[in-house]
Amino acid sequence: MENIEEIKDDMFIGFNEKGEKTTFYKLLEFDSTETGKHYLAYTDNSVDEKGNVRAYGSVVTQEGDLMKLEPITTEKEWKVIEMALNVIQEQSKNEEDK
């Protein structure tokens, strides 16, 4: 996808699918023991036609001082991210109920 220098305050500047400079917000960053990769789930806070906030996922690799976001290429990797986001969402929901 693109190179980013660092994520500051859970946000970073990148380029959207139209090539426009966009501010993205980190939802979740984690290492998967299942795949051995480092993942980042993020959003630009835009909504789809159903009113859902768009979320994206990438594999994070290091190139010197830069972080590089690589596309997720397998269904297995998408399932790993989906499961992690579901856990965070459930934890957040449980804390709101307290």
Image (cartoon, rainbow, N blue to C red):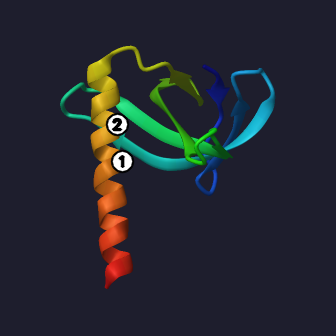
Residues 9 and 22: in front is 22
User: Residue extending furthest right?
Assistant: 20
Q: Image quadrant of residue 67?
A: top right
Residues 96 and 4: in front is 96
Residue 86 appears in the rendering: yes
User: Residue extending furthest left?
Assistant: 34
| Three-letter residue code for mark 1 | Leu
Q: Image quadrant of residue 92?
A: bottom left
Q: Quadrant of the C terminus?
A: bottom left
Residue at 70%, 32% in the rendered image = 14
Q: Please, is residue 57 above or below residue 84 in the view?
A: above
Residue 63 appears in the rendering: no
Counting from the top left corner in percent of width and height, residue 6 is at 62, 41
Label number found at residue 81? 2
Residue at 33%, 39% in the rendered image = 82
Q: At numbered mark 2, what does the secondary structure look like: helix, strand or loop?
A: helix
Q: Around disc 1, counting alpha carbons within 10 Å, would you say few (fewer than 14), some (14 to 19), or many (20 or more)?
A: some
Kindly check if marks 1 and 2 are in contact, taking CB atoms under 8 A apart as contact.
yes
| Three-letter residue code for mark 2 | Ile
Residues 66 and 46: in front is 46
Query: Which residue bears the numbered disc 1?
Result: 85
